[in-house]
Amino acid sequence: MSFYQTSELRGKGNEIVKAANDATDREIRDYKTSHTADGPHGSTYTPVRFTNPDTGATMSEDEFRSWLQGQFSQIPDIVVNHGNPDPKNFDGIIKDLEQVEGSFGGGKGATKNPDLDLADTAKGELGDNWQGVFAENLTDNMLSPFPVINENHGKVAHMLAESMRGTKNIYNGKRADLSGLIDNTIKALNDCGNKHGSHVPLALSVTAALTGVVAAVLAVPTAGGSLAVYGATVGLTVLGAGAVITNASLADAKTNVGGKTVNEVIDSFFQRLGDCSDAVSKEEQKMVSALNKNHTALVSMQQLAKDGRVASPLAPMRPKIDDAKNPTSGLEPKAD
């Protein structure tokens, strides 16, 4: 998907201003030509009058042009601001999350965690001395679940990475919409003065930014009673970025950019900016909703583990000797 980069947006805003000024010159010239005694409307000749739309006061042509330039001068800043955030700004956090996912054994950069072998090594060296209630609890509730917990952390990192890819895709779509709107607005301004003006359809790409809705399934440790608390699996919602953003069709009345006059074109430009902002907000809310649900699910997991005194899909129980004289006393769930 191609779109204007951040460094290009102000220049494109200036192009809109220039096209609007040029179109205004044509409108004034055409009006003067058609409303002279020798023109097509000579029998109804009316001198050119310039009126301030805000106050209704009559203005000279120079005053009108100055007022109009003030209105147009806001457009470059509006274009730049509407281009935020830059989709490239998400690349760093996506890369970091991919590295986290890889460190837990998932994703493209998967590496095996050597620490997972230490528990078996320790048990082997202890031999027959590895026995008693404490040893059994340590095995069932901390050492045995740890590989599953390690894998689940990778799945959470994957969910977060996909969420950031989806978020980046929203702003890719927003930038593509803005770029198309800029081009169509300039074209419409260049067509001002034509008999029917210009009405160029604009399809909003951002409305199809989030297309992948899948579940990241966290495995539940099988030892120590966790299955009874959680069931076999716990699901997280992942809103990912579709491989390709397709243009979504909206009603024509919502997507036309143009008009017969400069005022109509600029007015439609701002209306379409509003439509794009509304579409972005809806996509952002989908992502926020999914992440909020996942946060609630993860917090609930930890609370269930604490209440049920079992290992959670994301954290083992930690060893605690309740009575220094009794080394077989058990484990307790992590408090937070």
Image (cartoon, rainbow, N blue to C red):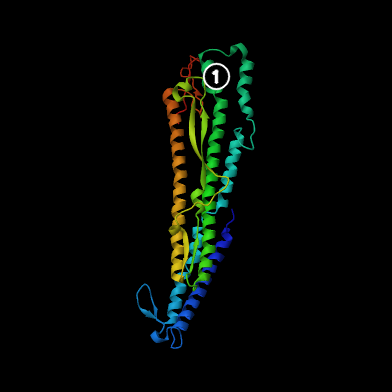
- Residue at the spot x=47%, y=73% of the render? 69
- Residue at the spot x=50%, y=48% of the render? 208
At mark 1, the secondary structure is helix
Within 10 Å of disc 1 (Cα), the crowding (few <14, some 14-19, many 20+) is many
Q: Quadrant of the C terminus?
A: top left
In this view of the protein, which residue sits in the foreground, 99 or 32? 32
- Where is residue 178? Give x, y as percent: 52, 58
105 horizontally vs 297: left or right: right
Label count reads 1
Height in image: 228 above or below 288?
A: above
- Where is residue 144? Give x, y as percent: 56, 21
- Residue at the spot x=58%, y=14% of the render? 130
- From the image, tell me which residue sits under label 1: 139
Furthest residue toward left:
56
Res 7 → quadrant? bottom right
Height in image: 11 above or below 315?
A: below
In this view of the protein, which residue sits in the foreground, 300 or 130? 300
- Where is residue 167? Give x, y as percent: 52, 47
Height in image: 274 above or below 191?
A: above
In this view of the protein, which residue sits in the foreground, 261 or 64? 261
Q: Amino acid at mark 1?
A: Thr
- Where is residue 220? Give x, y as percent: 51, 26
Furthest residue toward top:
128
